[in-house]
Amino acid sequence: MKTAALFSLVLTALAATAPATRAQEATVPESAMTFSAMADIVKALDPDATVSAGGIGLTIGNVPVTIVADAQANRMRILVPIASVAGLSEADFLRLMQANFDTALDARYAVANERLWSVYIHPLAELERSQFVSGLAQTVTLARNYGGTYSSGGAIFGGGDSGALYRELLDRSEEL
């Protein structure tokens, strides 16, 4: 699934779970996010998603996604496995850290259990529906762009190293 199709799917999910009218949206604040509310949003995205006490599993464009939440700790995580860390070089890790600074946006690259992950971490109760859906899209996009643009979306935070790396890639592509 292309990034444009992913964002279209995300917009559809937002519309399916949106308040009835814009007027209501402006006057009624979103309530605290719960595991159940996240499951409802995910089911709008993927009716085949699996929901259990331990988390939510779904697939977005052939990318496996796991969502876990702990209401008592007020935390949630969206996790996408990318690769084993066994073959990653020091240069690879440097590029991941550069991306975390300026192109990963709200999602991040992380390492745990000898795997490289794309993750989105947020306080659960304060998480808004739009943030959750954006976090899903960013996490999947970041995993897909590993080894390429290392980006979770179209924006680049200025002041990092990725802008120069992108210019270098463009210069090389123009030479071809």
Image: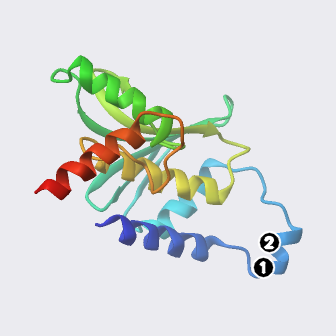
User: Residue, x 49% and y 60% (percent of image)?
Assistant: 42
Which residue, given by chain and number where applicable, does mark 2 sit on? 25
Asked which quadrant contains residue 79, the reply is top left
Confirm whether residue 87 shows in the render.
yes
**The N terminus sits in image quarter:** bottom left
164 left or right of 69 in image: left
- The residue located at (73%, 44%) in the rendering is 126
- Return the residue nearer the eye: 174 or 77: 174
x, y percentage for residue 53?
A: 51, 42
Q: Residue at x 60, y 48 (%)?
A: 35
Mark 2 surroundings within 10 Å by alpha-carbon count, few (fewer than 14), some (14 through 19), many (20 or more): few
Q: Is 156 left, or right, of 34 in this rendering?
A: left
Q: Dot 1 corresponds to which residue?
A: 22
How many numbered circles are shown?
A: 2
Task: Tell me what residue is drawn at x 48 percent, y 65 percent.
Answer: 43
Would you place residue 65 above or below residue 39 in this image? above
Q: Secondary structure at mark 1?
A: helix
Q: Nearer the viewer, residue 82 or 48?
A: 82
Q: Residue furthest right?
A: 27
| Mark 2 in CB contact with mark 1 (< 8 angstroms) | yes
Amino acid on which the number 2 mark rests in the picture: Glu
Residue 50 picture quarter: bottom left
| Cα–Cα gap, marks 2 and 1 | 5 Å
